[in-house]
């Protein structure tokens, strides 16, 4: 941006524009969605953005929306499109009289979008909330210390299958992902996906029913596993899983052949050609192949 430290104050949040990122600070108040209050602030690098829009909002407002690239934010990846519009941390709602100012900053951000803006990211660029984190589900208490996820069952809610399995602890290194279904819809849950596990889904049984029986899952309910607690939890686990997943090994460049060896082979090929054992076409093609190895 042109002026590091410029601030655009909106309803329930402010955006501070810095040289390489946007620092989003959320207000803490009774009208601010609990998820945004719990996030407090988020730093979004310019390279994390796919697009920037400015559209009319409700009741005399405009909405500045910095759309993140897929794969840059573990919170949005865990949410998987289930967040209500008002809980989207990338939306800034402003009074309509600030539309001209908002358009200025939207143009500034658009000018900073990089060549990868239209592509999914290979790594997270926006940080998840930090551990330790925890929340109460309907059937147990979930906690995460940064290295391990633990489930401690409640006798009032846990299924017999979970009681039989006992309290659970999962090292991040054992996990491949997290599945979060919002508690604001029917049959919400959080399930840990373990490396090497087969897909256990069954069309005859709902995902929530499976979660009720799965010791690697906790189920939500009215007042249990609220979005502002369970979603940051899921995002933090996802970020830790990604950080412990080895990066793909780089392919070593093919070793080049010794020029002297190539020269000897071309000479030998020439001798075969002169002796009539190799046709003109074969000689030309094979010589070109040998030269390409240099």
Image: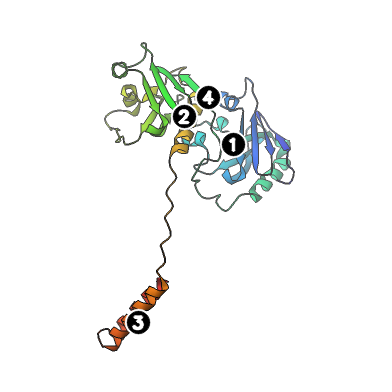
Reading the image, the residue beneath label 2 is: 234
Q: Nearer the viewer, mark 1 or mark 3?
A: 3
| Classed neighbour count for the residue bearing mark 2: other residues with Cα under 10 Å, few (<14), some (14–19), many (≥20) | many
The answer to whether marks 2 and 3 mark residues whose Cβ atoms lie closer than 8 Å is no
Q: Earlier in the sequence, mark 2 or mark 1?
A: 1
Q: Can you say whether 251 is above or below 242 in the image? A: below
Q: Nearer the viewer, residue 187 or 97?
A: 187
State the separation of the CA atoms marked 1 and 3: 67 Å
| Classed neighbour count for the residue bearing mark 3: other residues with Cα under 10 Å, few (<14), some (14–19), many (≥20) | few
Q: Earlier in the sequence, mark 2 or mark 3?
A: 2
Reading the image, the residue beneath label 3 is: 267
Disc 4 secondary structure class = helix
Residue 206 visible in the shown view: yes
Residue 226 visible in the shown view: no
Q: Nearer the viewer, mark 2 or mark 3?
A: 3
Reading the image, the residue beneath label 1 is: 90
């Amino acid at each position: 941006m042109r002026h590091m430290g410029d601030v655009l104050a909106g309803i329930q949040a402010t955006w501070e524009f810095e040289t390489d990122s946007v620092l989003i600070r959320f207000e803490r108040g009774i009208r601010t969605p609990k998820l945004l209050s719990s996030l407090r602030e988020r730093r979004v690098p310019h390279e994390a953005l796919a697009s920037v829009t400015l559209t009319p909002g409700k009741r005399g407002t405009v909405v500045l929306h910095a759309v993140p690239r897929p794969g840059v934010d573990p919170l949005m990846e865990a949410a998987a499109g289930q967040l209500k519009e008002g809980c989207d941390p990338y939306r800034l709602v402003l009074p309509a009289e600030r539309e001209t100012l908002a358009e200025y900053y939207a143009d500034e951000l658009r000018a900073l979008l990089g060549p990868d803006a239209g592509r999914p990211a290979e790594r997270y660029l926006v940080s998840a909330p930090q551990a330790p984190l925890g929340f109460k589900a309907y059937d147990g208490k979930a906690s995460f210390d940064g290295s391990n996820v633990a489930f401690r069952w409640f006798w009032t809610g846990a299924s017999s299958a979970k009681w039989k399995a006992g309290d659970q602890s999962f090292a991040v290194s054992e996990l491949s992902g997290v599945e979060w279904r919002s508690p604001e819809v029917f049959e919400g849950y959080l399930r840990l996906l373990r490396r090497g596990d087969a897909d256990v889904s069954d069309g005859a049984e709902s995902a929530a029913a499976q979660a009720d029986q799965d010791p690697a899952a906790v189920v939500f309910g009215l007042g249990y596993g609220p979005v502002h607690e369970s979603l940051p939890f899921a995002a933090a686990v996802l970020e830790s899983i990604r950080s412990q997943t080895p990066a793909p090994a780089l392919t070593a460049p093919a070793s080049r052949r010794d020029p002297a060896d190539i020269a000897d082979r071309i000479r030998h090929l020439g001798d075969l050609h002169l002796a009539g054992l190799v046709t003109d076409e074969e000689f030309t093609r094979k010589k070109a192949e040998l030269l390409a190895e240099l």
